[in-house]
Amino acid sequence: MPLSKKRTLTQYLIEQRRRFPQASGELNALVLDVSIACKAIARQVALGSLAEVPESWAAGEVNVQGEVAKPLDIISNLMLIKQSEWSGHLAGMASEEMAAPYQIPAEHQRGKYLLVFDPLDGSSNLDVNVSVGSIFSILRAPQDVIDSGRDVTEADFLQPGAAQVAAGYALYGPTTMLVLTVGNGVVGFTLDQSLGEFKLTHPDIRVPEDTQEFAINTSNSRFWEPPVKRYVDECLAGRSGPRGKDFNMRWIASMVAEAHRILMRGGVFLYPRDTKDPAKPGRLRLLYEANPIGYVIEQAGGRCSTGRQPMLGVKPSALHQRIGVVFGSKNEVERIERYHHDPVTREAPAPLFAERSLFRD
């Protein structure tokens, strides 16, 4: 189909709304607000070192995660807030870059949804011009928030991933894409720069159930738990190992880019719990990264897990909670889950260290 004939994001959302005649259209409008912010962020990212940044931001600020925020992290956060706060669809927002929930200003009407986002995932890759992105999740606000119009609290956002009504990400790469689910499968839109419109280019994204590709940061291998080490060792053993086939290994260090590759051609991504920092039960954020990406992956026929349980069933305990993440092709993720539930078996000692007659009583 020629690009000019492809449906726009607005047309797609209208079609989805027709499935629910009683719908108010507020969700559609909120998704469009997010998409506009993503277009603005894409333009800033594309400018790279040419972007004008206030001198006060040049040194970077330490955010609530204890990480130095790059200027584009701050800019992206502001763009998502300012584009979304005024329309009357939101009761509140939460961002990876903010310690507490963001309250909708008094001069704006409040709505029935909560918006949660990582404004610029993978921003450590900006200096080397690798794809980055924005991740977002939309939840319904608790009924008492909607009825009373009160300020939102942290507890209002602590909903399991299965409660999401929409989620997605924007990818800022060679092309800008918006990948979205509103609970009816996964679709991908490409930004037509000549029109400034997202056009539907990937109408039914599906994650293959099987794969021969995995992504993990092997520099942390000494901290891995036995089930993860077992899985990776088996993959690395290739055709002559227990899996009987060769695997390719990838690692981009940008979760959006990793998820997009898996959605396009399959694979499995692991950022598991490890022993590197016992105080942290994982590296990725449950609300801003794991849940929205997990919802997208599962809507596309894949699976997202902590390694021990389905990700979307986890009840959050804190706004900035971290968690171990495994997602991708269904059969591989289920295998990793089985390894976590198997009893830990000790490997037999190497012959060099086996008991010998010379040392027996």
Image (tube, rainbow, N blue to C red):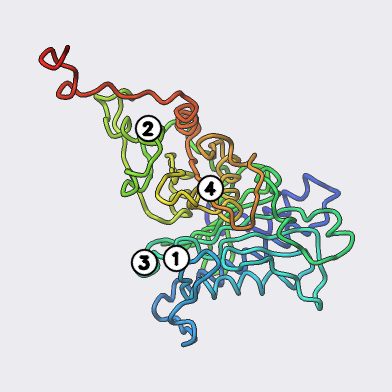
Query: Are dots 4 and 2 in contact, CB under 8 Å?
Result: no
User: Is disc 3 placed on a helix, strand or loop?
Assistant: loop
Q: CA distance from mark 3 to mark 2?
A: 31 Å
Of label 3 and label 1, which has the lower sequence position? Answer: 1
Residue at horizontal 54 percent and vertical 74 percent from the top = 74
The residues tagged by marks 4 and 3 sit, at their Cα atoms, a distance apart of 28 Å
Q: What residue is disc 2 on?
A: 231
* Residue indicated by mark 4: 323
Figure check: 80 above or below 216? below
Tell me the quadrant of the picture where the C terminus can be found. Answer: top left
- Residues 149 and 267: in front is 149
Say which amino acid is labelled 1. Ser
| Label 1 element class | helix
Q: Which residue is at the far front?
A: 361
Q: Earlier in the sequence, mark 4 or mark 3?
A: 3
Q: Residue under label 1, please give it.
A: 123
Q: In which image quadrant can residue 355 be found?
A: top left
Give the label, 4 or 1, closer to the camera.
Answer: 4
